[in-house]
Image (tube, helix red, strand yellow):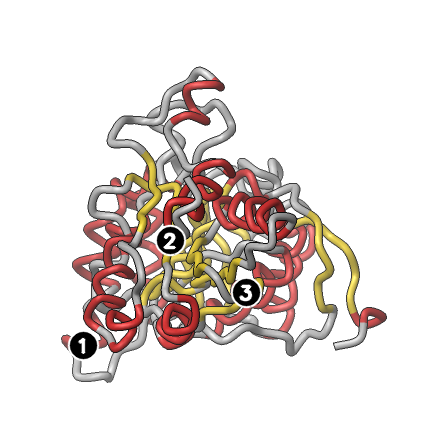
């Protein structure tokens, strides 16, 4: 794609653009959530949508996440394509019954005769000083539910492509947006037909010495570490699983076969995290025979996210954790 067909915008604006394009293309797309109308959403993603699409399609809801998700599931089964926003991913706990026991299972229980085309937008993660109840990364919970799809874009272009694909999908899609990425700027395609296929892992950086798998803001820290290590002659390959469930393992396995070393990282709590599943699948694959060192997992400590800024940073992986991990794998420490 030519640079002339793209423009620089924030992650926040890219999500808004994708939603706007899909609402213009399909009258069945509606948007509901707390303060998404005049206020424009907790993080400003829906600013301007009420003025263009009106109250019939931009629906301010009561402060009841259970009602929001339940309404979305019901609307989806009648042929609408609802997008619903949780102010914070933490509050998905209040909507899990409708999502897990209804939305995720209806297509299966009705023999494929029912579809549930809905998108659940989930602002997640730490870094904003929002403390323990507004900073969690709960993607591993959602990845344990057959019938859901779980995506997590890391760049503005990925955000636009995946939100459009999620809206067009006929299954419930959990769209995880790390709050610290909203102001990130990048080139975004302007083509209304631009989407990214759900279910793909992408190579963000090519290397030959060590494989790193990371997503969300942790991806940025991995890239920073790779740039530092390149100055020492160490070439790190970085893969980004844009879809956490169902995950595309093929590029990861191929990379591990090439490098023989693997680091898997995420901000979510390390125990029971997505990283453990990636490690298990690598060990179960032909890549196991190519490993030259034990796999390293980086993840959040088993504690609630602190309010204090220094403590908040201390409980999730940082650039130097990747650097020292690579040194360990290559026996440089």
Which label belongs to residue 108?
Answer: 1
Q: Is residue 271 left or right of residue 217?
A: left
Residue drawn at 31 percent across, 44 percent down? 138
Residue 140 screen position, x and y as percent: 27, 51
95, above or below 56, in the image: above
Residues at marks 1 and 2, CA–CA distance in whole angstroms:
36 Å
Residue drawn at 69 percent across, 56 percent down? 52
User: Does any portion of residue 124 appear in the rendered image?
Assistant: no
- Looking at marks 1 and 2 on the same chain, the residue that comes earlier in the sequence is marked by 1
Which label belongs to residue 207?
Answer: 3
- Looking at marks 3 and 1 on the same chain, the residue that comes earlier in the sequence is marked by 1
Which label belongs to residue 81?
Answer: none
Residue 328 screen position, x and y as percent: 38, 45
Determine which residue is flagged by label 2: 263
Picture quarter with the N terminus: bottom right
**Mark 1 or mark 2, whichever is nearer to me:** 2
Q: How many marks?
A: 3
User: Does any portion of residue 73 appear in the rendered image?
Assistant: yes
**Mark 1 Cα-neighbour bin, 10 Å: few <14, some 14–19, many ≥20:** few
| Element under disc 2 | strand
**Mark 2 Cα-neighbour bin, 10 Å: few <14, some 14–19, many ≥20:** many
Q: Nearer the viewer, residue 295 or 30?
A: 295
Q: Is residue 77 left or right of residue 214?
A: left
Which residue extends farthest top? Answer: 308
Which quarter of the picture shows residue 33?
A: top left
Residues at marks 3 and 2, CA–CA distance in whole angstroms:
13 Å
| Element under disc 1 | helix
Picture quarter with the C terminus: top left
């Amino acid at each position: 794609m030519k640079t002339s067909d793209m423009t620089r915008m924030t992650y926040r604006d890219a999500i808004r653009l994708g939603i706007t394009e899909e609402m213009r293309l399909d009258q069945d797309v509606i948007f509901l959530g707390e303060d998404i109308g005049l206020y424009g959403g907790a993080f400003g993603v829906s600013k301007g949508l009420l003025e263009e699409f009106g109250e019939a399609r931009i629906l301010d809801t009561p402060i009841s996440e259970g009602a929001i998700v339940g309404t979305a599931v019901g609307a989806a089964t009648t042929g609408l394509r609802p997008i619903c926003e949780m102010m914070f991913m933490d509050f998905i706990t209040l909507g899990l019954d409708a999502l897990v026991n209804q939305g995720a299972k209806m297509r299966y229980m009705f023999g494929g005769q029912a579809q549930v085309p809905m998108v659940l937008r989930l602002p997640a993660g730490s870094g904003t000083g929002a403390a323990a109840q507004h900073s969690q990364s709960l993607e591993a919970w959602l990845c344990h539910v057959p019938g859901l799809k779980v995506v997590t874009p890391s760049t503005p272009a990925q955000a636009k492509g995946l939100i459009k694909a999620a809206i067009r999908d006929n299954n419930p899609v959990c769209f995880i947006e790390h709050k610290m990425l909203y102001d990130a700027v990048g080139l975004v395609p302007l083509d209304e037909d631009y989407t990214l296929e759900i279910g793909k892992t992408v190579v963000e950086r090519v290397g030959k010495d060590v494989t790193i798998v990371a997503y969300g803001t942790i991806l940025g820290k991995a890239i920073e570490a790779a740039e530092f290590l390149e100055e020492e002659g160490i070439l790190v390959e970085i893969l980004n699983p844009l879809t956490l469930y169902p995950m595309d393992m093929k590029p990861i396995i191929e990379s591990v076969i090439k490098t023989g070393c693997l680091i898997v990282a995420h901000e979510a709590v390390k125990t029971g995290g997505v990283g453990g599943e990636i490690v298990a699948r690598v060990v179960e694959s032909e890549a196991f025979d190519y490993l030259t060192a034990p796999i390293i997992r980086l993840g959040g400590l088993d504690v609630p996210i602190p309010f204090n800024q220094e403590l908040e940073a201390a409980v999730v992986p940082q650039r130097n954790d990747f650097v020292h991990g690579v040194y360990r794998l290559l026996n440089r420490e």
